[in-house]
Amino acid sequence: MEWFTAPDYWLSRLVFQRALAVMYLVAFLTAALQFRPLLGERGLLPVPRFVERVPFKRAPSLFQLRYSDRLFAAVAWAGCAVSAALAAGLDSLLPLWGAMLLWLMPWVLYLSIVNVGQTWYAFGWESLLLETGFVAVFLGNDEVAPPVVVLFLLRWLLFRVEFGAGLIKMRGDECWRKLTCLDHHHETQPMPGPLSWFFHHLPRPLHRVEVAANHVTQLVVPFLLFTPQPVATAAAALMIVTQLWLVLSGNFSWLNWITIVLALSAVRFPADPPSVSAAPLWYVIVVLAVAALLVFLSHRPVRNMISRRQVMNRSFDSLHLVNTYGAFGTVSRIRYEVVVEGTTDEVAREDGDWREYEFKGKPGDPRRWPRQFAPYHLRLDWLMWFAALSPSYAGSWFGTFVERLLENDRATLRLLRRSPFAPDTPPRFVRARLFRYRYTTWRELRETGACWERTYVREYLPPTRLVGSGRPS
């Protein structure tokens, strides 16, 4: 069975598994801390309402069998516990079959969350975590050397992530072909980070170099993953450097970090492999069968990649086993933000005492500098960015969000950085206004201390209050 394993990659497997467990931990922690106001029984998009109309076949989940907020919390915190145990190396203390079952647990638990998460979980990195986590189940532990075919599947996944993203850019916005997208991207990206202002103000020729380097990394370098060492390690290292550059320039949840984790599996670390026993026959059969299934299912993302109508971030099966990825096929030139305000005035006047709600990550007060949150995912803040692009993106939840603000709902307010109202004094009216945001110049920053300059565009939601039925009006 020497052909089946690659002993030289034992340390690569170890680093990959521990890093992946940390990604799982972040994902479950995000779910545990945010689910109640987003998906709970009184959430903006309640899970019970979703499972009533969507059958198990379309969205397999433990919550299709039964739902309660207490059960969701148990699933999320259990996922945190299992992820922490994997990060600490518990799988290495178990027999091979036990380690595989342990790695299967977070995949099942997180799949249950994603499949009822609706728009709050409609991000490509959710599927990427699930696909990576499923492949990791079959990577083995200290009892056997890493299977070659599983290492290939991880590189194949990394290839699709990078190459698919490169293709969607070349087929999408012309600014990628003209090398000008970064003239706008750092300013208009969903959630800027603390260094995004500085990235935006880099010289434009350097922006052209950044875009060109990105094209090389995503359209050429991925093919080198399937070449002999040390070329494959160099290719993976280049991808890691590129992803770290993206980590510094914005807040993209765990998208960049899990791409780095995938790249680590292709790096061959210089370390002598320990002695291990031969892979048992049952393990070989299971791994080869799963690999054959995943290769077969890969025809759908391949067809998507070569299609002129390529789509981004699409799951082709309800288990998220094989997916297609990509980001920023188009880049916005102008940044809009929805500013939500409330007042305790008896009558909603334009010049009344309107006070602004502060979000944790999305831009608000022009003088408040962005913070680093990734790999933690602020789901409401991200959806507020989409809401600013078009009200249609928020049609299913924004009205309920306003209702919860009018109620001073404690769970919803915990999603925000600050509410301008005391817990026992809810606002009488809530309104939303659309502003255009742009980064200040170096001179404006020195003179005002503000990193943003904002201009009123139009009314987004007129002053709204609760009526007798408890619904906003």
Image: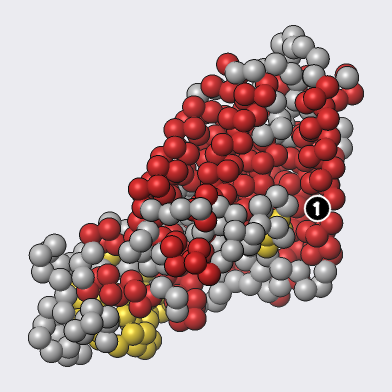
Q: Is residue 133 left or right of residue 450?
A: right
Hey, which quadrant is residue 34 in on the image? bottom left
Secondary structure of residue under mark 1: helix
Q: Amino acid at mark 1?
A: Leu
Q: Classify the position of the C terminus by image quarter.
A: bottom left
Asked whether the viewer can see residue 354, the reply is no
Asked whether the viewer can see residue 93, the reply is yes
Q: Residue extending furthest front?
A: 65
Q: Nearer the viewer, residue 70 or 387?
A: 70
Residue at x 67% of width, y 35% of height: 136
Hey, which quadrant is residue 437 in on the image? bottom left
Q: Is residue 441 above or below residue 295?
A: below
Query: In this figure, which residue is indicated by the disc labeled 1?
Result: 297
Instruction: Tally the marks.
Output: 1
Residue at x 55% of width, y 52% of height: 61
Q: Classify the position of the N terminus by image quarter.
A: top right
Q: Is residue 113 above or below residue 401?
A: above
Residue 411 locus on image (x, y percent): 27, 58
Q: Residue extending furthest top?
A: 275
Residue at x 85% of width, y 42% of height: 292
Residue 462 locus on image (x, y percent): 29, 88
Q: Is residue 239 left or right of residue 367?
A: right
Q: Nearer the viewer, residue 53 or 88?
A: 53
Q: Residues within 10 Å of mark 1 (few under 14, many from 20)?
A: some
Residue 196 locus on image (x, y percent): 47, 58
Residue 435 locus on image (x, y percent): 37, 80
Q: Is residue 383 left or right of residue 320?
A: left
Q: Is residue 141 left or right of residue 23?
A: right
Q: Is residue 368 above or below residue 467?
A: above
**According to the image, what is the colour scheme of the structure?**
secondary structure
Residue at x 80% of width, y 19% of height: 280
